[in-house]
Amino acid sequence: TVELRSRQPLIDINMMRARAVWTNNLVAFLFGVGMYSVMAFLPEFLQTPSSAGYGFDASIVQSGLFLLPLTAMMFVFGLLSGRIAAKFGSKLAVIVGSMFSCISYVLLAAAHDRTWEIYLVSALLGVGLGLAFSAMSNLIVQAVPPSQTGVASGMNANIRTIGGAVGAAVMASIVTSSVLHGGLPTQSGYTRGFGFLAVVTLGAVVAAFFIPNAPSLDPHGT
């Protein structure tokens, strides 16, 4: 209400109401729920002693290496996202990225007993995040006037962070809802938590379909 009445609002609420903006922000929020939660809880899962009946006894360095495919694929597909957007449109890149992310969480919930399964999930998640984040930035820039690109892009990033805060809190509640005698979460808690992330990211897939189509980006600037 205050922002609507201000002559020089910090955030243009009318801009935030634009369909191309709020749909991208909704996808960013849901992506934030998944990304920050898995970054926080997957390493803990990997570092769990095998005496608990699950886990990999991974050290901090080893658990980081499990996430190396995520980093590498996110970097590669972030670079490729521009070419994909130029040919097929940024909206499709967001949809495909959301699907890859959803599939990775489904696989993580269903199969997390072998090292190759974790590496596969990590790589697929990197593909999804790399495609979607870069494409969302393109869509936000195309959806608002040049004078508002900074605010719109900044809010998109902030909303993703808010999603991460909400997601981490909910994920913590799910994972710790049942514990072993030693105080460690049960394997079923992690399974339910990863399943929750899959459902949330499925919502991102659905929301991505409501993003308005934008003109394809011409890599030659013509």
Image: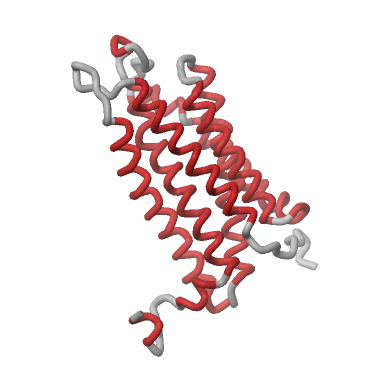
Which residue is painted at 39% across and 33% down in the image?
193
Corner quadrant of residue 98: top right
Q: Is residue 158 left or right of residue 135?
A: left
In the image, residue 222 sits, relative to residue 86, either above or below, namely: below
Q: Where residue 150 sits: x, y (%)?
A: 49, 70
Q: Is residue 141 left or right of residue 44?
A: right
Q: Where residue 82 sits: x, y (%)?
A: 68, 53
Q: What colour scheme governs how the chains and residues are painted in the rendered image of this protein? A: secondary structure
Which residue is painted at 52% across and 24% down in the image?
119
**Residue 202 seen in this snapshot:** yes
Q: Nearer the viewer, residue 23 or 87?
A: 23
Furthest residue in direction bottom, as rendered? 7
Which residue is painted at 50% across and 54% down in the image?
28
Q: Nearer the viewer, residue 163 or 65?
A: 163
How many marks overall? 0
Corner quadrant of residue 51: top left
State which quarter of the image contains the N terminus: bottom left
In the image, residue 186 sits, relative to residue 198, either above or below, namely: above
In the image, residue 210 sits, relative to residue 37, either above or below, namely: below
In the image, residue 117 sits, relative to residue 146, either above or below, namely: above
Which residue is painted at 67% across and 55% down in the image?
91
Corner quadrant of residue 172: top left
Q: Where residue 124 sits: x, y (%)?
A: 58, 33
